[in-house]
Image (spheres, rainbow, N blue to C red):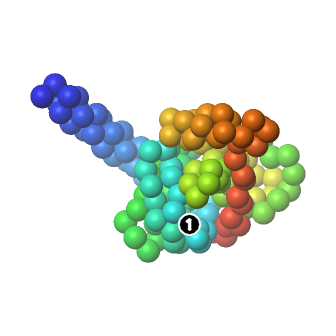
Amino acid sequence: MARQIAKGLTMLMLLLTMALVTAVATANGQSQHKLNARIPFEFIVGDKMLAAGQYEVNAVGITQEALAIRGRESNDGAIRLTMTKEPKDNRPARLVFHRYGNTYFLSEVWEGGDGVGRQLKESAQEKGMKRELSVIARNGAHYEEVVILANVR
């Protein structure tokens, strides 16, 4: 019983946080460029599995530290906090995924050019997969990086 109450409270807090982030983003009016990309595989953002398809990604919030990922062909979507990552070169807009076997995790989002990137924190699931692979393959290769180019709008 207590577990169900805790789960319900957690869901309520998550919904309130998402509503607050959305409200702040709307009130802020400082929308960064939106990235559009077709992702040809299922992928995970935080603890949520999103289907393959066309997605729109943009920074939200007063400090633009959260990313909103929304499916354009489905109702899939997620919001995650990110850390700023400085560009090392002048490459195009892109989404970077970590691939473990057939499981993909969104890791970074870049606007392109010399724009600032956003790095997502590794989820508990990704950390667990990385740990398992490091035990299996002692050669240090934990994951493969997969890059999807995006359009800036």
- Which of the 4 image quadrants contains residue 32? bottom right
Q: Residue at x 43, y 50 (%)?
A: 48
**Is residue 121 something one can see in this rendering?**
no
Image coordinates of residue 137 in percent, x first then y, are 72, 40
Nearer-the-camera pick, 120 or 145: 145
In the rendered image, which residue does mark 1 sit on?
41
Q: Residue at x 78, y 63 (%)?
A: 92
Quadrant location of the N terminus? top left
Image coordinates of residue 118 in percent, x first then y, are 65, 45
Q: Give the residue type at disc 1.
A: Phe
Give the residue furthest to the front. Answer: 136
Q: Residue at x 66, y 58 (%)?
A: 95
Vertical placement of residue 5 versus 47, above or below: above
Nearer-the-camera pick, 22 or 78: 78
Nearer-the-camera pick, 3 or 73: 3
Give the residue furthest to the right. Answer: 89
Vertical placement of residue 129 versus 43, above or below: above
Image coordinates of residue 142 in percent, x first then y, are 70, 42
